[in-house]
Every structure is written in C-alpha cells, then in structure tokens.
C-alpha cells in the first residue's frame, strides 16, 4: 500500500489554506490536490501494511516537537515533475528547511527495511524524464525528494495550464500568516486515483 507521511499545520494556517482551496474550486473547478487537507509531505513510499511499521512511526511521531516555522511566499512549480501541471505552493523560509529535512531523513532511514521495492506508479511513469538525482532517489527510497532535494512546502492545488492564470491571480497577493507550528503528524493511504485516506494521526507535543 502506498503511504503518505505528512505534517499538518496548526488550525489557523489550516483554515486559511482551506478557505483558499474553496475559492480556487469556485473559480476554476476541480483540480489536483484541491480535495487534500493542508499538509507538508515528508515521504511517500510503498509498504506491505501500516501495521508492520506502526511502532516505528509512533516512535518517530513522539520524537517531534512543536517548533516555530515561517512561511515565505507563494510560488509555482511550473510543469510539475509529478502532475505535469502548474502547482501553486506556499514556500517556507530558508531557516525552516533544515530541521524538516533532518526529520524526513530520520523517518526515511527508520522505514528503509520495511519499504517494498515497488516504485509507485506516479513516479514509474515519469522516472525516465526525471533529472538523474530524482530518478536515483526513486530507485533508492521510492520517493524523488529526499534530503537536500526536498523543498518543504504546502501545495494548494495543481492547476490545469489553461486555468492557471485565473487561479494564480487569486492567490498571489494573499497574505501569509507567520510564524506557525505543526500540530499533527499524519499518515494517509494514497489510492491510484491520487485520493488520500487518513490512517493515523499523532499529536505533536510542545
């Protein structure tokens, strides 16, 4: 099963992103990622079952502490390497990046022995067009964005290019609430239709 491991922002930020997602949907209709709750993805990989790794995941969640992070700006992953669309994202300040990358590497290493060697379909179809560094990560970790390659961000939506301009005009001047912290660490199952289903969520301690 394909699992997504993600950090969930505090309620104030969460609600702000949800309002923006609703406005984007009202403006340009259904788009990739619009139905996902706001989250920052740490890792996506294939496992036989969540029960096999639950103890490890629980231990990792317990190691997380609430820290102050700052968002920087709205940006766009143009011709997104995963969706092929225009992905509107909220970037974090540089000083917020390293602690998130360290947490990700700890998670990836702790789960390494339990990951299946199956390359997720969402990457297998594109691996030949990936830059070599991304392709290498897919082969080694099952996920393209590990370590220094990871750009921690919140994705609002991945927009069809024909509708992107209107969505970007709506978002680009929206104010960003900062600083903030993450409230939860959540694990989802990711379906072949790219739909998330929550499996487990852990509160992050102070």
Image (spheres, helix red, strand yellow):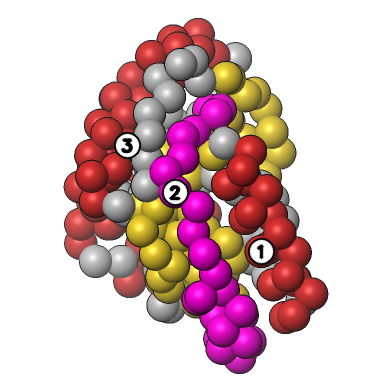
Side (left or right) of 11 relative to 144: right
Relative to 175, 65 lies left or right: left
In the image, is 166 to the left or to the right of 89? Answer: right
Whole-percent x, y for residue 206 in the image = 46, 16
Q: Earlier in the sequence, mark 2 or mark 3?
A: 3
Q: Measured along the vertical axis of the image, is residue 183 above or below residue 120?
A: above
Q: Which mark is residue 100?
A: 3
Q: Secondary structure at mark 3?
A: helix
Contact? badges 2 and 1 (CB < 8 Å): no
Which residue occupies the foreground of this view, 51 or 72? 72
Q: Which residue carries the number 2 mark?
A: 178
x, y (%) of residue 74?
44, 67
Label 3 environment density (alpha carbons within 10 Å; few <14, some 14–19, many ≥20): some
Magenta segment: 160-185
Q: What count of labels does the image hold?
A: 3
Work out whether 161 lies above or below 191: below
């Amino acid at each position: 099963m394909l699992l997504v491991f993600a950090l969930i922002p505090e309620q104030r930020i969460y609600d702000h992103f949800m309002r923006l997602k609703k406005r984007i949907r009202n403006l340009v209709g259904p788009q990739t990622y619009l139905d996902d709750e706001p989250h920052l993805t740490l890792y996506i990989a294939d496992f036989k079952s969540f029960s096999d790794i639950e103890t490890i995941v629980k231990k990792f969640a317990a190691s997380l502490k609430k820290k102050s992070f700052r968002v920087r700006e709205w940006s766009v992953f143009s011709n997104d390497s995963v969706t092929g669309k225009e992905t509107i994202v909220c970037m974090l300040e540089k000083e917020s990046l390293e602690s998130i990358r360290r947490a990700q590497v700890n998670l990836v290493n702790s789960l390494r022995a339990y990951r299946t060697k199956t390359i997720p379909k969402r990457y297998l179809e594109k691996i030949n067009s990936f830059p070599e560094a991304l392709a290498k990560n897919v082969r080694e970790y099952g996920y393209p964005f590990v370590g220094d390659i990871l750009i921690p961000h919140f994705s609002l939506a991945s927009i069809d290019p024909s509708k992107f301009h209107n969505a970007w005009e709506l978002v680009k001047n929206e104010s960003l609430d900062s600083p903030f912290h993450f409230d939860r660490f959540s694990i989802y199952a990711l379906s072949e239709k790219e739909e998330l289903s929550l499996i487990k969520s852990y509160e992050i301690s102070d």
